[in-house]
Amino acid sequence: MTDAAAPPTTRKDWASDQEVRWCPGCGDYSILAAMQFLLPELGAKRESTVFVSGIGCAARFPYYMNTYGLHSIHGRAPAIATGLALSRPDLDVWVISGDGDALSIGGNHLIHALRRNVNFTILMFNNEIYGLTKGQFSPTSEVGKVTKSSPFGSLDTPFNPLSVALGAEASFVARTHDLDRKHMMEIFRRAYEHEGSAFVEIYQNCNVFNDGAFEKVSGKEARADMLIPLEHGKPIRFGAEGEHGVVLRRDGTLEIVEVADVGEDALLVHDEARENPGVAFLLSRLARGPFEPTPIGVFRAIARPHYGALLEAQIAEVARQKGGGDLAALLRSGTTWTVA
Amino acid sequence: MHQYDGGLIREDRHTALSNTVGHPGGHKVRTLESVVIRFAGDSGDGMQVTGDRFTAESAVFGNDLATLPDFPAEIRAPAGTLPGVSAFQVQIAAYDILTPGDEPNVLVAMNPAALRANIADLAKGGTLIVNSDAFDERSLEKAGYVSNPLADRSLSGFRVYEIPMTSLTLKACEPTNAKRRDAERSKNFFALGIISWLYNRPTGTTLDWIVARYGAKPLVVEANTLAFKAGYNFGETAELFDSSYRVPASELGPGEYTNITGNTALAWGLVAASQLSGLRLFLGAYPITPASELLHELAKQKHFGIVTFQAEDEIAGAGAALGASFGGSLGVTTTSGPGIDLMSETIGLAVSLELPLVVVDVQRGGPSTGLPTKTEQSDLLLAMHGRHGEAPVPVVAARTPGHCFAAAIEAARIALKYRTPVFLLSDGYLANGSEPWRVPDVAELPQIGVEFAQHPNHTDDGVSTFWPYLRDPATLARPWAVPGTPGLEHRLGGIEKADGSGDVSYDPDNHDRMVRLRAAKVAGIAKDIPPVEVDDPSGAELLVLGWGSTYGANAAAVKRIRARHGSVAQAHLVHVNPFPANLGEVLGRYRRVLVPENNLGQLAGLIRAQFLVDAVTLSAVRGMPFRIAEVERAISDLLALA
């Protein structure tokens, strides 16, 4: 909810009085800062902002925001937030989750919230590890990951979070990373402005249990050649001089090319509003993991009526047809008889 | 006991109104005080519709009544087999009855399987009406009969009427030119016609209903109408029956009545609670037998502003309801035992968050999938204790189908006032059974006042703040501040909270205090509920104590014992947690306490633990409610009555 008349807020207004208890050096700090910087910019109201989380390191996020907040149970935040968002369309609802919370124990709720297009924003902090339980592999850990629970290497094929979201009919899918506050703020802003479910994967470093998981793509030195910024309506290119690019081949696959070899006209032009999620899906799988050139930005943003709007419209329509609810009439809606 | 071919005098009245009068059609009409009829057939034969319609005719006629639908879990088990038999029992009476009756006086069996599955229950000398067309060799074999019971002597103890219902229905439907298969499907209306004639039921209700229900399919309307009328006329003209029967209207108290099932009453009670509290009703639910009708009924009531959210599972159903409660709605979730298993963690969260949540458990036979369509009372301890940690939850139990309405309002009242999840226990018997229910005047329903916190409630170093866990000293309820309220921003969570401020706290003494506070809050509700009433006209030494759907059987058994000059008291609990404040004192007055339960003694265990009372359990877990005779026998054994 924005309100032009309300006095502007600052980052300080959005920080709660609680001591932040993430490990020193955790990527969560920068995500928290990005949010606390962004909300004043958006003109959001503290009383109308709610953060709902499940369980995990990321799930402590609501305690640190001076807004309404609900730290719930493992994996269930999308379900709980669905009830809140549907019953209170006036609120800005954010769901804070991690890779274990959203994709393992809560996978079912995530996909159903996305297909319904509930009007909230899901931020999934992906650190490819279980942090709060001290270092087991997660559903996004790479095959062969050696952890306490996989001393001989994990056998599990990981999820690609964006592919999952796209497969679940998400209307807004984006990726950002914890080392770039400006990019995070831009993506969060886009997610906030989106009507319906917005799913944002944030590459987040766990410096205790999985340090450097994204270093190869998001590290300062690597970034230019390893992150592929997606910009709507523009050819997809990256590199310090924009020398690399992405083309869509005739066989339906994507390929990274040198722009000098193919010419700019041959490059794939990014269209986040494409109704068919096929190309977004290809982009989500362009890198096999965070060690190959990886697209970031908004993969998909389509206009689709959100569940709450459809729900309110249906209630209004039924009320129009039947008239408002009349309890006395309801209780007499079956056959009745009178005993004198 | 007097015995008639068409009905038995039931329960506490042992004299028959046996005046015989002439019928306009020349038949004799004999008067009965009550009769129990069971319609049985294949699951595809429409026995539930038949039973429902007969019930509706009787309700409109003014009888008291109680019903017991009994159907298989399979939608269509193989036709003609025992597992596919579906039945509907109804007792109609000229006086106040409490149960659908122990044994039917009349059994309508549409095929051999229905006969085989139900004949053991038919009262000695009872009336058996069979569709003789269905007794071919193949159907007999499917039902496991080696010889045709209509041809051998096995049914000689009953008054048997063989009626070729299928062929008579086909003949009646000839004018419609309906296909044989389609016309045959109307044979349940033929059966209904016969029974409607036999018991002098008004037919208008059924004829109107056929039009309302099948209006979009004129052929079906016509076929069902013709079959129904043919059955009625068959009774009148076939001279098969030497008389018909009249069960006079009951002397229900004055008022407007409707026939209602427990599920409908419960759903309407939730709508009422929403209206009375001024809060939007948010139902989060996942379909499950026998609770789905709650979701269906509320989904029809959208014009009340109700949100019905069919979730991806019960976890999400309860979660969404809790999220809605956080936002200031009346959050409700409806399910049966397996759903409660999945919701346990969410209910525990609601205990910790101290937010209102009504959790409806329409109990069915367990464990696991158990007996999905059959009744049981075996989730009481699940409701009491089915969460990790010290997580007390108030429990309210409905006792008759109509009482589900008041029980729903009461569960919502407690949830909203004390900011707590509340269990509302119903069961398969209450859910699908029906009874005449006096429609309450909306103005006489209790208002449920709800106040959201609007202002800071604490000062910290001269700064006004909001403490979400600063309790009302009287109720120990915490303030309910909903998002959107400026200045009251706060964070709730499942982690232990500091008493008062609600900040995360791992302090051992604080946890000890919070555990005790939550327990004291729930225990304190005892001050806010009515004392348990005891029906004890003669200073008995034996108390029959019940909860939930055993009410009817218990009360009827107690009446019978008193008619035999036995002295017995009865009390029935609506509030099972906390118990009414006077329960200990009441129990202390009796030398013996008998607790009939459709479980292995769950309430009895709670009573023993809390009051050190040596309660005697009467148990039955056959997926059916108690018969009156079972409870009567247990009482008379304890009283050593001859």
Image: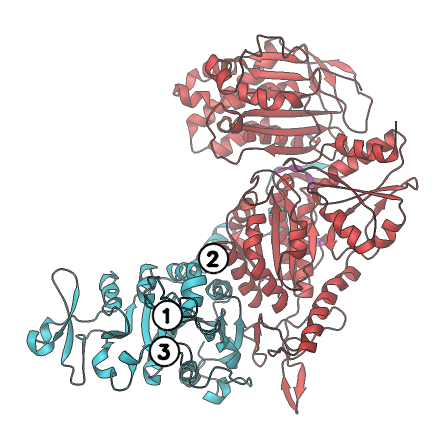
Chain colours: A cyan, B red
Quadrant the N terminus of chain B occupies: top right
Q: Amino acid at mark 2?
A: Ala
Name the element at disc 2: helix
Q: Nearer the viewer, mark 2 or mark 1?
A: 1
What range is drawn magenta here? B432-443
Report x, y in % for residue B473: 75, 73
Q: Is residue B8 magenta?
A: no
Q: Is residue B441 magenta?
A: yes
Q: Chain of mark 2?
A: A
Left or right side of A140 for B402? right
Quickly name the residue at label 1.
A146
Mark sitting earlier along the chain (2/3): 3
Name the element at disc 3: helix
Q: Nearer the viewer, residue B460 or A23?
A: A23
Quadrant the C terminus of chain B occupies: top right
Mark sitting earlier along the chain (1/3): 1
Q: Nearer the viewer, mark 2 or mark 3?
A: 3
Q: Chain of mark 3?
A: A
| Residue B342 in which image quadrant | bottom right
Q: Is residue B8 above or below residue A135?
A: above
Quickly name the residue at label 3.
A189
| Residue B216 in which image quadrant | top left
Mark sitting earlier along the chain (2/1): 1
Q: Is residue B334 above or below residue B40?
A: below
Left or right side of B249 for B317? left
Report x, y in % for residue B122: 67, 21
